[in-house]
Image: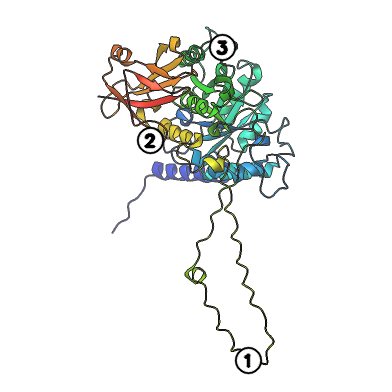
Amino acid sequence: MNKPVLKRSQRTTICLAALVALSLSAKTPAQTLARPGWVGSGMTARTWFKHAVLYRIDPRTFAQSSKEPEGLGGTLKGITERLDYIHDLGVDAILLDELASGPGTVDPALGTIDDFDELSLQASRRNLRILLTISHPDPALARYWLTRGVAGFYVPGDPNSPAVAAIRRLLPSFVGQRVLITDADLSSDAAKSPANELQLDTALLKLPTPPATNAAAELRGALEGDQALLRTGSPAMATDAQGLPHSVNRFAPAGSEREAAKMIAVVLLLNRSVPVIYAGQELGVHSGAAAMMPWGKPPVTEPEPTEEAAAPKPAPPPAPFTPSERYVPYVAPVKPVKPAKPAPPDPATAAGQELNPNSVLSFYRQLIQLHHGRNSVRDGDDVLLNYDSSNALVWVRKTANPSLANPPLVVVCNLSAKPLSLPIKADLTNLHLRGSFLRSVLNPESQPVSMDLNPVVLPPYGVYVGELRY
């Protein structure tokens, strides 16, 4: 049987493809070709960061390596040891705060460049990208880190500086869809941003502005500002950052941090902007907490007794008494004292929240799944409703053609210290949306299964996220 003969052009194409593949596999760091589905892998043309969730970490306070003495602070090795936790949270990329100011260096307190490479490798194996913060933009520094496989940078400050412009021009020369995050230019004549750029709106980092009389009005204004950014680029949103008061303390009084943490979570994760979660937010960390991330210790499970251990062996029969033996009084054996069960982990820690379906951590995980997996959240538009007079934030997320299979999502947040009773049916009807009640899309442990539209009833700082049903 004759073998098929390839044309010369076909042979040339195959050879070139093989050479490119060998070149990439030999020279490209793991982060560049990280996983199927990422732009640069050849599997899809979808831009990875448009619907991503970013997890921002201060390496100095995140996690200490288990191999280092206590009290040394966070390190790159510590982050590597916690990658499974980050992966289970459901985020797409890690944004590291500044590692060092010089090209090719890492602060010795954080580790070495080899530690960074190991972090990058292990993150890639878990489908996580690594991005870096560069406080002092330098194209040479950016080029160095890009060759090590980072997925991009956050450069705070003036987005129109010559150094930022040079980094902007540099990114397209590296494969793998590298991204640049800059602070948003809110001026009316702001130029349209490149396709591989996110504009971080820093307004929420400062809200509410004291003396705040209506936090809902300020939040609504910030969300409307992000909608305006869609005309010139892709907005990103953050409520917390290094050196700033925690958002839960800005929006709610002491004692209501857990409720405020869930309210802030829905603001971050259920709108059009790319959310930037600051490490610890997913645990409801608040002012007064320890400087380091509160990991806690997992509960100790006592081993189940075996049948042999559970059934004590019978004591041997006593030796027969003879008159010649001296009498020895009977002494009862001392029963072993069963050790007390260890105290359950602190509910303010990651270990304490891990298995609690009603914890802030579980709430964040559910919302991140919703952010990635629901059409109305991933590709829908926001419609903000004005309930400022009730200090409530209400918005609808819907696709262009809502249906029973793809219903609109309604989010209601009570930003006051009083219970909320809010009739919203008329406003939804005015949007030509059919529905008579909301059905929860979150864990029943987190909120009621259903909620009437007239009225929606929420406790202080409560939230409700539900499909519009009829």
Label 3 secondary element: loop
Secondary structure under tag 2 reads: loop
Q: Give the foreground label among 1 and 3.
A: 1
Residue 212, numbered circle: 3
Which residue in the structure is indicated by mark 1? 322
Q: Residues within 10 Å of mark 1 (few under 14, many from 20)?
A: few
Residue 444, which numbered label? 2
At x 58%, y 33%, the residue is: 280
Q: Is residue 267 left or right of residue 148?
A: left
Whether residue 24 appears in this view of the structure is no
Residue 28 percent coordinates (x, y): 57, 41
Q: In this orientation, which residue lies closer to the viewer: 57 or 196?
A: 57
Say which amino acid is labelled 2: Pro
Indicate which disc, 1 or 3, sits on the residue closer to the N terminus.
3
Local crowd size for mark 3, using a 10 Å CA cut-off: few (<14), some (14–19), many (≥20):
few
Marked residue nearer the N-terminal end (1 or 2): 1
Which dot marks residue 216? none
